[in-house]
Image (cartoon, rainbow, N blue to C red):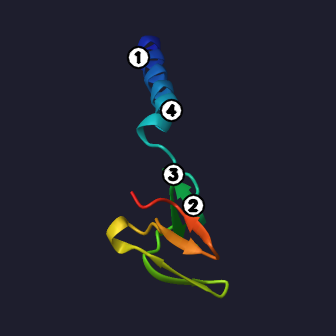
Amino acid sequence: MNERVFKRTIAILLLLVLLGGYMFPIPAHAETGWVEKYGNWYYYDENGNKVIGWLELNGYKYYLKPESSGNIAGTRCNGTRLGTNR
C-alpha cells in the first residue's frame, strides 16, 4: 500500500469515528419513575417503558390514560392537580 492510499484510508477512518456519534448515537440511560414532558406527567418502569392503565405505587393508585399515551393530565393526587387536560 503506498503512502497516499494509506493517508486517505486513515483520514476516512478518522472521519467515520468522529461522525459516528451523529450517525449512530449511543442511547442515553432510560428514564424511570415520574417524568414531566411538555406539561404532562408520565411514569416509566425500571426498564424505561412507559406505563399505561392502573399503577399502584407506594400505597397510591394512579390511572395512566392509554388514550393519551400514559399521561395523567387532569388527574388529582392528594389534592394536587397533575399536568393539564389539553
Of badges 3 and 1, nearer the viewer stands: 3
* Disc on the earlier residue, 3 or 1: 1
Q: Earlier in the sequence, mark 4 or mark 3?
A: 4
Outermost bottom residue: 59
* Viewer-closest of 15 and 5: 15
Q: Residue furthest right?
A: 58
Tell me which label, 1 or 4, sits earlier in the chain.
1
Q: CA distance from mark 4 to mark 2?
A: 33 Å
Assess whether mark 4 and mark 1 are in contact (beta carbons under 8 angstroms).
no
- The part of the image, by quadrant, that contains residue 58 is bottom right
- Real-space Cα distance between discs 4 and 3? 17 Å
For marks 4 and 2 on the same chain, the one whose residue lies earlier in the sequence: 4
For badge 4, the amino acid type reads Val
- Give the labeled residue for mark 2: 35
Separation of marks 1 and 4 at Cα, in angstroms: 18 Å
Q: Is residue 40 left or right of residue 78?
A: left
Q: Are marks 1 and 2 in contact (CB under 8 Å)?
A: no
Residue 12 drawn above or below residue 39: above
Residue at 51% across, 47% down: 26
Q: Position of residue 8 (x, y in %)?
A: 43, 17
Q: Which residue is mark 4?
A: 17
CA gap, disc 2 and disc 3: 18 Å
Q: Residues within 10 Å of mark 3 (few under 14, many from 20)?
A: few
Image disc number at residue 82: none
Label 4: which secondary element: helix
* Element class at badge 2: strand
Q: Quickly name the residue at label 1.
A: 5
The one of 44 and 54 positioned closer to us in this rendering: 54
Residue 80 percent location from the top left of the image: 62, 68
> What percent of the width, then of the height, locates residue 17?
50, 32
Q: Quadrant of the C terminus?
A: bottom left
Residue 27 is labelled as: 3
